[in-house]
Amino acid sequence: MDLRYRAAVLGRVLLAALGGYAVAALATGLLALVLPMPRSEAVATATLLSFAVMIAVVVGVFAVRSLGRAALLVGGLALPLGAGLWLVQTLAGTA
Amino acid sequence: MRQGFRQSMAWLHAWSGLVVGWILFAVFVTGTASYYRAEISRWMRPELRTVQADPSQSAERAVAFLKARMPDAAGWYIEFPKPEKPVIGVHWWKSLAGPFHQALLDPETGAPTAARDTKGGDFLYRFHFELSMPPTLGRYLVGACALVLLVALVSGIVTHRRIFADFFTFRRHARSAQRGWLDAHNVAGVLALPFHLMITYTGLVTLAPLYMPWGVQTAYKGDEIRFFTEAGMMPEMPVPVGRPGSLAPIAPIVAAATARIGEAPEGMAIYSPGDARPTVVAIFEEPHGLAHLHPQIAFDGATGAIHGEAGTARAATVTSAVMVGIHEAHFAGPVLRALFFLCGVMGAATVATGLVLWTVARAPKGAQAAGVGLALVQVLNLGTIVGMPAAIAGYFLANRLLPIGLADRAAWEIGSFFGVWGLVAVLGALRPASRRWPEALRLAGALYLAVPVVSALTTGEHLLRDTRFLGFDLAMLALGAGLIVAAHKAGRRHASARDSRRSPGMTGEEALRA
């Protein structure tokens, strides 16, 4: 149980909690805008799914082999979701 | 982190479970008790008797009281008397940020009720998701714990190689205590697994507007009211004009609402009552079924004319409302409600056995001394697992023993709840490890057994004279007897553990995988 192990555990906990929530929040925000249904239904559907998204990310962060891969997983999900959300909001703003 | 998916999930299960276990145990116990919130509230106000009250008249009395109390409020809410709560509940607030004031009125006079001052079952209900903390902080904390519980459930399922076989496995007479605790944890966890998954996810959905507001944020620019209105959960409401005015008589509005739906509303909300354009909303009980969707009609409070009705909710909104409905189980009849209660007890038992298993699996072997961490977990385990139920018994006893006229009586009852909890935890920590469980369980059992006795002595009502509280008294006796039996078992286990040699221990992860 050396310091490096402890630091890696702390890293995963932070990545799971903050990264998991960030991915879930971005996915909810994006789906609420792009799901092909009435606005209120899209919000309700996205919100219902959000907790499952977060749990999947948390399980993924603890399941992959290394902290680096866990960071890649969270980053690989958050970046496209964030970019998509930015794009949709920008397009809606100019339309 | 360990190699392999199952191993990493076993690690995740053991540690995530420990970190939130104590809070989750309290949440499960108070939530389970809340299935009988109305019955608890009724028992805690024994002075109240069922009365026949006319909603229109009740509304007039409530409005007269509220006008005198806070004419320039942001909102008032009136709850009509019902068989399980035979008083008029009134609430008033100057701002949505609080504070929220409330009182109970006698339906026959319109004056504050003479019944004892208590929070009743509402205290346990609110503790279930606010932990007696500032509301938002408590809700965030419980939400975080619920998310971790969901992670623990998923990782626990993954960890089980033989989830179906475990369903039928309970080695009660197993040689090692750890094996027995593991099986108990599995039985309680797996048998009611659908309930555990359901109650955790639906609990998160119930407070989703707080936990996950980002859909409303992007699609509605954060305008929650707009979202609720479009989703069919709220009617369109008149906008206040900012000039003082007066409220139309309330009785005709109640009558119009009743005529429209075919039954009397369960409550009336009045927004900006002192404005020239106030809003009156009649709120009805959920129609028969699973969904937690109250029909609502909004009236222009200046003229008394109907302004709008809540629309028809569509699939996703109804799904969401059904989740809230299943969580609260308002739809359930007596048998189904008892089943929900039992499942809740199993949930609490799963958390409790998991916490105990964590310490048993890490108990020192041979001459090794127990570490500070382990000792701390052991003390906190007892303080929570026995202290929490004992505290509820203390709350009930305080309800009968505190003088009726005591100032801030309801706060004293809550103080007794925490006092008993702290007392059990401290006494448990001071006693030697082999004695603390049987002693604390016996104390908690005695407190429960005392509840019907103290109640009979102080109110003169008992099961032989009046069957009004028969169910409550029997539940107290059953809980007390159960705790005494548990104390007996815990005492025996320690006696036999001293005689026989401990079987070679496993680490928590090994235990989970076994």
Image: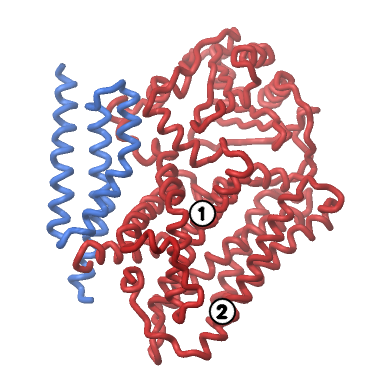
Q: Position of residue B50 (x, y in %)?
A: 78, 35
Which residue is pictured at 33% across the width and 43% down the height?
A: A51
| Residue located 38% across and 59% down the image | B164
Which residue appears at 52% of the width and 52% of the height? Answer: B343
Front tag of 1 and 2: 1
Dot 2 alpha-carbon crowd within 10 angstroms: few under 14, some 14 to 19, many 20 or more? few
Give the colour of chain B: red
Q: Secondary structure at mark 1?
A: helix
Residue B378 location, x and y as percent? 47, 74
- Where is residue B280 shown, x and y percent of the image? 57, 18
Q: Chain of mark 2?
A: B
State the image coordinates of residue A18 (x, y, percent, origin top left). 26, 50
Q: Is residue A49 left or right of residue B467?
A: left
| Secondary structure category for the residue under label 2 | helix
Residue that mark 1 sits on: B28
Colour in which the image shows chain A = blue
Distance between the Cα atoms at labels 1 and 2? 27 Å
The chain letter under disc 1 is B
Colour approach in the figure: by chain
Q: Considering the image in quadrants, where does the N terminus of chain B appear?
A: bottom left
User: Which residue corresponds to mark 2?
Assistant: B430
Using the rendered image of the protein, determine whether residue B276 is visible from the camera's viewpoint.
no
Disc 1 crowd rating (10 Å Cα; few below 14, some 14-19, many 20+) is many
Residue B163 in sight from this viewpoint: yes
Residue B201 badge: none
Q: Amino acid at mark 1?
A: Phe
Which residue is painted at 45% across and 46% down in the image?
B199
- The answer to which quarter of the image holds residue B230 is top left
Give the amino acid type for the residue marked by disc 2 in the picture.
Leu
| Quarter of the image where the C terminus of chain B is located | bottom left
